[in-house]
Image (cartoon, rainbow, N blue to C red):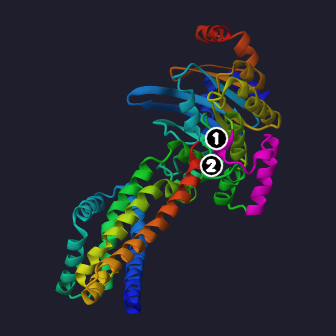
Amino acid sequence: MFEKNTSERVGAEQTVPDAARSEQAAVSIRHLSKSFDGVEVLRDVDLEVREGDVVTILGSSGSGKSTLLRCINWLEQPDRGSIHIGGQRIGVNDAGRPMPVRELARVRARTGMVFQSFNLWPHLNVLHNVTEAPIHVLGKSKTQAEAHARELLEKVGMSPKADAYPSTLSGGQKQRVAIARALAMQPEVMLFDEPTSALDPELVGEVLSVIRDLSAEGYTMVIVTHEMAFSRAVSDKVVFLDKGLIIEQADPETFFTNPSTERVRKFLEREES
Amino acid sequence: MNASAWQMLLEGAWTTVWISGVSIAMGVTAGLMLALIRLARIPVIDQILVLYISLARATPLVTLALFIFLSAPTFGINLDRNVAGILALTLNTTAFNAEIWRSAFRNFSRDQREAAMAAGMTPWVTFRRIMLPQMMITSLPGLINEMSFLIKGSPAIAVIGIVDLTRVTNRISAVTYEPLPPILVACALYMAAIGCLVWLQRIAERRANRLAV
């Protein structure tokens, strides 16, 4: 009931104080703006991701969707606006100053990220790619971290390759390891930056099915993607970015069958053809 | 060559090996530290380091060794000739190594660094666990090149009276009037030392294949 109410009164959201909003949201983005060399890539973006929700961000290339995702864990620094992860502001401390690196690292560790080009560490085998951060960031013991890593590799279907090095894996396998690596930090929210865009078409399915399993398990996820059918199947909310503006935000049924803007209608037509 | 000549040769070889070894170890480490400091771009310090690196790279080893050994008393320091020799070799090789490490930093994959940041690693952990292990392997060909230059340039320290492998051949032939045998043995010993380095490099290359993503 309460949720319905707030989403209907869009204008009234501005009056809800920061803290109250942040508490209920896994990620809360407010008035986010960002320019690269004078070009505005994000313009006053507001976005709420509730715990357990899967939000997919769609838009044509250059719309700012990857930048938005990368702002969430401060890989890009926005020019204006704020981002809270589980109620904690990232990048800026209470005094309004840029966060010291150690503190920033701690907040970042609450998120897990999966990159388009996998970004595995080539000098470590699959198992150690997954255990590296839990051991050296969370301070887990080696045995504990390895036991957890083997569970996660099992989950993404990569147990048989635990001792292999990344250079011997296919793209789909690398991405599944990267997902396990991100999950190993037990993040509150998972960020996916076009996780299947660098894959051969026949390998896309194996990665999407892993992500689908995660959504069924209730993981909070923000996914930038071009896979429309996947977005429709997995999302609780679809966000459409156009030239740095969120021009549509809706549940997947509404978004894909009855979008309210001409721009989204055109986009969906083009994707279907 | 008699037994005492052989003994002198081996002593000379040992002098070359330990002085070079100490200089290499210090030079590789100091080079890495200089590269790290230069990354921080601290205003005045950065310029001083640039000046040091260009001076050290432009000065012949013989000149540097002489300068250090002869100028030390002026500053009231009584410098042992071995220490002066090590200092000269280290100051020279550090400058070259700093540049090798710096380029390894510059070329390090941004993607991998981002993955480390996203996983909550601090810059120090990222450096220690992700960057350094890979930089050691990718820099090794350059570093080993520089190490072999150092060993081959080490006879320069004879100028301040250190009896190294090359100097000792002179001493032997001054007695025997047969310069060829000791020189040939010295060559073989230099080749053995360089051979060890090349062998190290081959191991590194085998491991480097793994890094090709």
Q: Residue furthest bottom?
A: B4
Write the residue at 40% across / 60% down. B145
Residue sitting farthest toward the left: B74
Tell me: residue B10, above or below residue A54. Answer: below
Which mark, by number, is residue B119? 2
Q: Quadrant of residue B187?
A: bottom left
Tell me the chain of label 2. B
Indicate whether A190 appears above or below A127.
above
Q: Using the image as rendered, state which of residue A269 and residue B153 is in the foreground.
A: B153
Is residue A240 located in the magenta-colored stretch of the structure?
A: no
The C terminus of chain A - image quarter: top right
Please state which amino acid type lies under the numbered disc 2. Ala
Other-residue count near label 1 (Cα within 10 Å), few / some / many at <14 / 14–19 / ≥20: many
Position in image of residue B156 (x %, y %): 26, 74
Q: Which amino acid lies under the numbered mark 1 shown in the image of this protein?
A: Met
- The residue indicated by pointer 1 is A113
Spatial distance from mark 2 to mark 1, Cα to Cα?
Answer: 8 Å
Residue B158, how many percent across, how many down? 27, 80
Question: How many numbered discs?
Answer: 2
- At mark 2, the secondary structure is loop
Please report the residue visible at 25 percent of the width from the left and 70 percent of the height from the top. Answer: B61
Magenta segment boundaries in residue numbering: A142-169
| Element carrying mark 1 | strand
Residue drawn where x is 75% and y is 33% of the image: A211
Question: Is circle 2 on the same chain as circle 1?
Answer: no
